[in-house]
Amino acid sequence: MSGRARLALCAWAATLMASCALLPLVEPASWILQAALLLGVQALVGAATRRVPLARPLTVAAQALVTLMMLTLVFAREQAVAGLVPGPEAFQRFADLLQQGGDDVARYAIPAPLESDGIRLMIIGGVLVIGLAVDTLSVTFRSAAPAGLPLLALYSVAAGLSDGGADWLWFLVAAAGYLMLLLAEGRDRLSQWGRVFGGAPRTPGGEPGMVAPVRTGRRIGAVALGLALVVPVALPAMDGGLLDGTGAGVGGGSGSGGTISAVNPLVSLRDNLNVDEDRQVLSLRTDPEDQGSLYLRIVSLDDFDGRTWKPSKRNIEKVPDEFPTPVGLGADIRRAEITTTVTAAEDYRQDWLPMPYPPSGVQIDGDWRYEPEGMTLVGDHDQTTGGATYEVKSLVVQPTAEQLAAAPAPPAALRREYTEVPDSLPAVVAKTAREVTQGSANHYEQAVKLQEYFSLTGGFQYDTQVQVGSGSEAIARFLKYKQGFCVHFSFAMAAMARTLGIPARVAVGFAPGTPEADGTVTVGLRDAHAWPELYFEGVGWTRFEPTPTRGTQPAYTQTDSPNSNLPDPGVPSRSASAAPSTAPSASESCTAEQKKLEACPSESAAALPVTGGGGPKWTVVFAWVLGGLAALAIPLAPMLWRRRTRAVRLGAHGRSEADAALHTLAVWLELTDTAWDFGILPDDSQTPRKAAARIVRLGHLDPTAADAVHRVADAVEQVLYAPRPRPTAGLAEDVRRAIAGLADPVTRRTELRAIFAPRSTVRVVWALSEWWTGVTARVAARVAAARPTLRRRPSGQEG
């Protein structure tokens, strides 16, 4: 293997090894195989164009073009010309996927689902861009040390987003790849000077040899690796960013069913509440005439790490015919069952099914899965709510204030799980909770006082323009400045409730929509909402509403309220629309409570957000890539052959008498073939001197180019007729001067034809014809030689 080929292989391997740092960010990790294949094709294109050889910018351009075609084949095949050549629609598809990927990066937890084409494009496209940069720097421009910068950028981004569990392992892998690249370049560079890597051994008082480049490479490598250690350490300290590795969402996991990935409610809620036009996403109809208190719930956030709230990892199962009784709901609590018919907007696609809580049954077409703890439905693979109409039976739980106040202590496992707060939670949160609820006789009174503190007495203002923030000081800042929207109010109340020993979590969904004249209720993007749910034994998870001017406060929290405005038992009716929020909603699955009670069902197939088709199979992709490369190579084959032939002819040294004749004749053949490409047919009957004069005359060469042609002709005559041919220096440069002179006076059309359709490529046909003639002649000779040895058998006929 040549030095450059070895260097290209090391560049491919180094990029792939650095890309391993991205493995914890996306699940499953099968994308690394796709990236390895596409990187390999990219590297092969670079090796082929350098062997032609093409100019360095053309090599990079060829690699970039093939990379774009491969990405088009994988991600925008339906929008491309012949499935491979990108056009305006393909570029629009890329723009849409990148925008979708940017949204998903902010919304999904780590690991994000690979089924998101936007995230997959960002990861695989990013790896290919880094691979192109590494190959360009280390192989095309023969400078491996600066190639550590794109590798460092790739590793640093991955390390900054991951949770840090195995960062050291990926650092070692990336560092090993970079050092391998440095060593390969050092070996290749030093081998050009006739020494093996490492130089000759140093002797006392002797010359140091070729060790300076080795030292330089080591120093550069040490600096780059040092930066790789320092930069990721600083990145996680950038507190509160939406790309935080501990952002909201459900992480991936192992098992037959997998775990569910969810959106970041901080992002989706704020985006929905701040839209310029409140687009309708849901339309519903339910039994009671007064539908003003019907919330639609999507997900519960029960994992609080001090920075933000997010769903725990959960399992899913087959949708049951009848849902079980909600956890903690006693038989003595008044309840009513209502039926709600929901229709989702066609253009609003959501993996999670918005439903009243708690549901007791769902009728919906399609492939859906059930998450027991949150009692929610999630689309399996590509199933979404877009245009769906479904019927939900749900319970309207109507506890009294007395029942809530008399609620016994919750189970120890549930209390321990849902009252946990991290050490990083500022002390002011618990202090404020104690001050606000001072004098309360039970958890119910504490909960009511917290709700009134935020909605009435605390001086808080509702403002959707306030930045969400997810750092450990976010709740403390909210309590200080008293401005925010539903996320701030629900997160703060749930955290304060936990400090008081009340099990708490946060629900995300839609607040009651707008009643219409026809009896339906429309729900828009601005109805996206979050509210706290507190657990009371005998009642279960109970909604509270701390956000001022939003939603409705439950009757059981309003002591002055004479009657409950909750509906009586209803009869099935129809509802119109349930459209998901602009961003995928958060997910729910088997909670920690059920895990601890060993009530979790077996895992089922993972339900992940689906943003498009799964893409073609790898065999099809590889076949298309090869077909595309062939389609690209066929029209360019004459040009590539001529460039390769010219490089071979002019690249021979001819520095000794033994190879002087071969080098000189090769240079002369290149000169005459180039003249042929420009329309000057070769005439083998003429002497080199006369042929040179003919080229000068017909080519209208300037004096400099004419002198170069005559010098080449003189060298040819010298090697043909001199007793001992001598090598002539500078012949290759003379031919290049002659080529420039031939291209100067011709038209643009003639020059382009000489480049892309050179006439001298007919020599390939002549060579094939000569080869075929030789093959047939050899076969005929062997047949003729074997003929005398064949003996005829005597005939069996008698005369």
Image: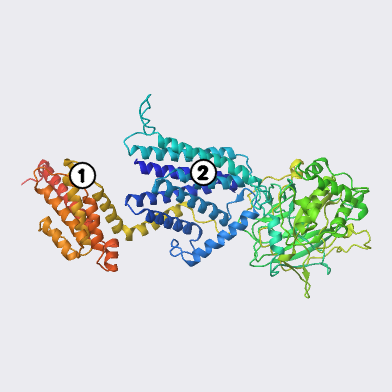
Q: Are marks 2 and 1 in contact (CB under 8 Å)?
A: no
- The colour scheme of the drawn protein is rainbow
Say which residue appears at 25% left-offset and 55% top-offset. Answer: 736
In the image, is residue 486 above or below residue 794?
below
Image-quadrant location for residue 501? top right
Q: Nearer the viewer, residue 636 or 129?
A: 129
The image shows a total of numbered marks equal to 2
Q: Earlier in the sequence, mark 2 or mark 1?
A: 2
Q: Which mark is residue 654?
A: 1
Crowding at label 1, few (<14), some or many (≥20) Cα neighbours within 10 Å?
some
In the image, is residue 633 above or below residue 790?
below
Across and down, in percent, residue 294 comes to 80, 63
Q: Nearer the viewer, residue 364 or 713?
A: 713
Report the amino acid beneath label 1: Gly
441 to the left or right of 363 = right
Q: Nearer the viewer, residue 327 or 36?
A: 36
Is residue 358 among what the camera can see? no
Q: Mark 2 — residue?
A: 18
Q: Pick the quarter of the image with the N terminus.
A: top left
Is residue 569 among what the camera can see? yes
Q: Residue placed farthest to the left in the image?
A: 799
Nearer to us: label 2 or label 1: 1
In the image, is residue 368 above or below residue 92?
above
The kind of secondary structure element at disc 2 is helix
Report the amino acid beneath label 2: Ala
Across and down, in percent, residue 204 comes to 38, 24
